């Protein structure tokens, strides 16, 4: 069921997005609640700061289901072209979500561009998170929200084996 909204930049945010992960037999499913959280922070005004947080959900043989997105937090480092979660707040949220039965799946943040593209800083961050995190998956998920409405403005990346790979959302 699609949720209607007055904001053209939100578009079909009430609809889950699906992206097949090549070679795994799995899909990333971005549930509507998590999607709405991410889209709420798009940098639509020229002076808006980047925002971000963590992604949580469940893993099955067929999918990585992102059901919740947290953040931003007080104390985050936020600027027009940079974002870094406050580590203590991010870790506390990871523990809180784990107590609810949700796994840490990765990170999300915004970019001040129509169709977002991962930066060299994003790649370095993914590499550091991969190295330092205890994951229950074989890949770390990163979603970058740009200004464009709908799925076009939500870039999905998968980090594994040392590389960050863009993953396409499935056409509906």
Image: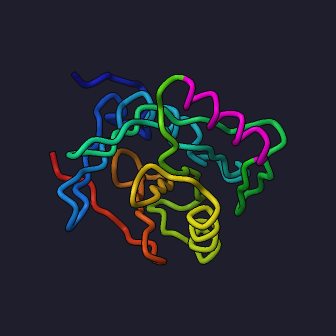
- Indicate yes or no whether the magenta region holds residue 81: no
Q: Which quadrant holds the N terminus?
A: top left
Q: Residue at x 27, y 41 (%)?
A: 60
Q: Which quadrant holds the C terminus?
A: top left
User: 80 or 97, which lies in front?
Assistant: 97
Q: Which residues are magenta?
A: 86-99
Q: Residue at x 45, y 33 (%)?
A: 34
Image quarter for residue 157?
bottom left
User: 141 or 52, which lies in front?
Assistant: 141
Image quarter for residue 66?
top left
Residue 92 percent across, percent down from the top left: 71, 34
Residue 23 percent across, percent down from the top left: 20, 67
Total labels: the figure holds 0
Q: Is residue 117 above or below residue 35?
A: below
Q: How has the structure been colored for display? A: rainbow
Q: Main secondary structure of the magenta part?
A: helix
Residue 87 vs residue 21: left or right? right
Image quarter for residue 35?
top left
Residue 149 vs residue 23: left or right? right
Q: Is residue 128 above or below residue 169?
A: below
- Indicate yes or no whether the magenta region holds residue 96: yes
Q: Is residue 108 above or below residue 113?
A: above
Q: Residue at x 32, y 22 (%)?
A: 4
Q: Residue at x 58, y 58 (%)?
A: 111
Q: Residue furthest right?
A: 75
Residue 31 percent across, percent down from the top left: 35, 33
Residue 39 percent across, percent down from the top left: 49, 39
């Amino acid at each position: 069921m699609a949720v209607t909204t007055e904001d053209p930049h939100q578009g079909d945010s009430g609809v889950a997005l699906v992206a097949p992960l090549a070679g795994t037999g799995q899909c990333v499913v971005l549930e509507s609640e998590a999607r709405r959280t991410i889209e709420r922070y798009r940098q639509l005004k020229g002076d808006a700061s980047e925002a971000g947080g963590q992604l949580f959900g469940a893993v099955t043989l067929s999918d990585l289901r992102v059901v919740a997105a947290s953040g931003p937090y007080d104390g985050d480092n936020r600027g027009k072209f940079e974002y870094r979660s406050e580590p203590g707040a991010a870790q506390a949220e990871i523990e809180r979500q784990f107590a609810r039965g949700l796994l840490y799946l990765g990170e999300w943040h915004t970019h001040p561009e129509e169709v977002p593209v991962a930066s060299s800083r994003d790649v370095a961050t993914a590499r550091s998170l991969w190295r330092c995190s205890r994951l229950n998956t074989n890949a770390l998920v990163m979603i970058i929200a740009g200004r464009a409405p709908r799925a076009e403005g939500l870039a999905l990346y998968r980090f594994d084996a040392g590389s960050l790979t863009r993953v396409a959302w499935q056409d509906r």
